Image: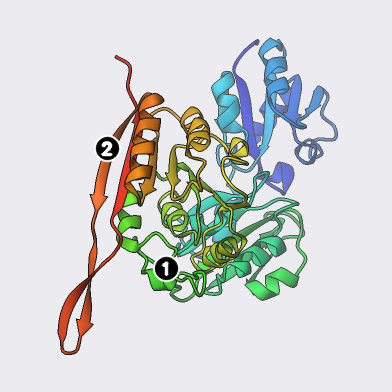
Amino acid sequence: MAETIKMIGIGDEGKQSLLPLYEKWIEESEMLVGGERQLAFFPDYKGEKVVIKGGLSSLVERLQQEEKQVVILASGDPLFYGIGGYLSKKMKVDIYPYVSSIQLAFARMKESWQDAYFTSVHGRSIRGLAQRIDGKSKVALLTDGENTPAKIADYLLSFQFTEYKAFVAENLGGEDERCGWYDLHEMAEAEFSPLNVVILKKMEEGPSWPLGIDDQEFYQRKPDKGLITKKEIRTLSVSALQLKENSIIWDIGTCTGSVAIEAAKIAREGAVYAIEKNEQDLENAQQNMVKFRVDATLVHGKAPDGLAEFPEPDAIFIGGTAGGMEQILDICCSKLKTDGRIVLNAVTIENLVQAVEAFKAREFETDITLAQISRSKPILNLTRFDALNPIYIITAERKKVD
């Protein structure tokens, strides 16, 4: 590579967005790299043009061997969900940003943006967006041709995000710029330019649920109501998982989805994968996901079938094994990430012994809590206590090698 590469951010208005010095650098360069839209702003460029298509690894390999003077054009701020962060880790790059599309959108909206939550569904799955944005006062979203404003509106409405309005800014800085406010039902029916930014603003308070959601808030199987990890046990179990904001979590035997939901609200930037063999329980879990605004991957099946398809987890909760504990733990223990945790709830002494022996055989250390919970209950004008079933909460970690 001949010298440090210059990466210049450019707006939708083309050359007009560039400082004279940046134009000079472009004119003096021998190779101009960028997307088709950015390169089209320079029809008279005399050097070699290279269009960025697909993955960036092949481009990096080429530029690392290139002896020509190179300038890379990027949209807006290359370090805001752009190619700047990736390329700067691979080679020497000096970055000269333009105003980001998000900054321009907030300017058109005439609102401050230091307190906004930023996320992108550009080239990414929309899965998990619900728990990421729930409760945020302002949300800035980068979109693409798949995750359009209309699709985003449909998605949000499916999780009952009715307290939000949307500001959509199209073709920012260009001749066809258009900006406007929409309620989500309007946005779901409208068509927009492919180049757009969506900003969600909370117009009124929505529902909120702190850790330890009351049992009666969940949809449950009837007439066998009560097949749920009770609030107190759920809180202890989720605490034992020691989740982080970006944790990947498995919930085996999710039933109503109560643990998956509590876990997802902690691991907002992570993901939850849940499996349940009973179809009716799975339907309840899906209803609960909608109610509590959690977008988890729910699978109808009997573990261990299907677990091998899940990504490697940071934490695993096992609420039920339906007799297949050995096979389930084979997969769970082998796929669990380093320093991860498995929390297994057992009701019987036999399952407790089986679980502890199974973890020991796989060189996992266990810590056991016997939770014996009683809740107050009125009796005439007095109060007594009503005992819940005792639960063994088994926390397992792989032994650390000195």
Q: Residue 276's spot in the image, x, y percent? A: 56, 53
The kind of residue tagged 2 is Asp
- Disc 2 to disc 1, how far (Cα)? 27 Å
Residue 191 in which image quadrant: bottom right
Looking at the picture, tell me which residue is in the foreground, 262 or 335: 335
Image quarter where the C terminus lies is top left
Residue 367's label in the rendered image is 2
Q: Residue 377's spot in the image, x, y percent? A: 23, 78
- Whether residue 243 appears in this view of the structure is no
Residue 232 in which image quadrant: bottom left
Secondary structure under the numbered disc 2 in the rendered image: strand
Looking at the picture, tell me which residue is in the foreground, 100 or 214: 214
Residue 376 in which image quadrant: bottom left
Which residue occupies 42% across, 72% down?
A: 217
Q: In this view, does 8 lie above or below 281?
A: above
Q: Mark 1 points at which residue?
A: 226
Question: Crowdedness of circle 2 by 10 Å Cα count: few (<14), some, many (20+)?
Answer: few
Query: Position of 27 compared to 318: left or right?
Result: right
Q: Residue 378's spot in the image, x, y percent? A: 21, 82
Which residue occupies 42% across, 68% down?
A: 226
Q: In this view, does 313 lie above or below 349?
A: above
The kind of residue tagged 1 is Gly
